[in-house]
Amino acid sequence: MSVSAATRLEALAVEVIGCRRCPRLVAHREAVAREKRRAYRNWGYWGKPVPGFGDARARILILGLAPAAHGANRTGRMFTGDRSGDWLYRALHRARLANQPTSTARTDGLRLNEVFITATARCAPPENKPLPVEIENCRTYLLGEMEILTRIEVILALGKIGFDAALRLLSDRGASIPRPRPRFAHGAVVRPGNEYPVLVASYHPSQQNTQTGRLTEEMLDEVIAKAKRFAGVG
C-alpha cells in the first residue's frame, strides 16, 4: 500500500525539526527562544527548525526566505505570528486559498487550500541573512518536499533569495533554465517547460517592503492571482 503525501510530509517534518546541521543557526534560534521579546515573554518559544505547512495536494508552492526570530521561531509554523504573515495570510484568504485571514499560532485553525508554504532556510538567521552554506544545508529538505508534492504547478517565490532557490530547485530536478539566467523582479515569470512548475516572483511581504510601499496589498493580490491562473486553481 502506498504511503500518502500527508504521511510522507509528516515524516519529513520530523526530520526537519530535529536538524542541527548549522551551528550558527542553532545557537541563534535557541538564544532568541531563551531571551524572548518582552511582548512574548509568556510564550514558550518553538526555537527549532520550522517545517513546511499546507495542503498535501497543493498546486501552488510558496517559497519564502526563513523563519522570523519572533514569528515562526516563536510559533513553530511558517509565516505565523509576524507582520509578513499578516500580509500573506490576508492575501491568501482574499484569494480563497486560506480559510481565515489571520495566523497567530499552530492551533488557531488555519487551513490552506491548494497551497503549501515553505522556506529556503528552516531556522531563523541573524539579521534575516542565512549564509550560502546554510541555504545549501537546507536544500535537501526543499527537494524532499518537491518529491512529495507531485501536483505542484507553480512556485511563487517571495524575495530574491527565494527566487534564486527556486531556480536552483528547478535546475536540480532537470529543468532547463533560460539563458541569460532570469533576473528577479516583482511579477516576473519563468517557464522552464511543460514538465516543470512555472516560477512566479514577488517582493517579500517584509516590513521593509510593505511599510515603504514597495509592495502593496494590490500588488500581492495580483501576483497571487497570476499564480492561481498558471496553476489552474479556481
Image (cartoon, rainbow, N blue to C red):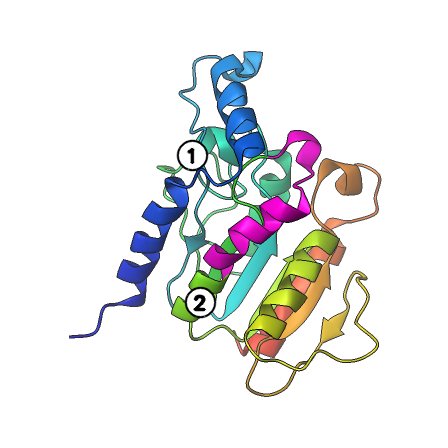
Quarter residue 153 falls in:
bottom right
Mostly what secondary structure, the magenta segment?
helix
Give me the C-alpha separation between circle 2 and circle 1: 22 Å
The answer to if 69 sits in the magenta stretch is: no
Please state if 92 lies on the left or on the right of 185 as rendered.
Answer: left
Amino acid under label 2?
Ala
Query: Element at badge 2?
Result: loop
Residue positioned 51% across, 17% down in the render: 40
127 inside magenta stretch: yes
Which residues are the magenta region? 125-142
Identify residue type, mark 1.
Ala
Query: At 81% from the left edge and 62% from the top edge, which residue is drawn?
Result: 185
Spot occupied by residue 142 in the image (x, y as percentages of width and height): 50, 59
Label drawn at residue 58: 2
Q: Secondary structure at mark 1?
A: loop
Q: Is residue 214 left or right of residue 101?
A: right
| Relative to 81, residue 66 above or below | below
Left or right: residue 179 compared with residue 102:
right
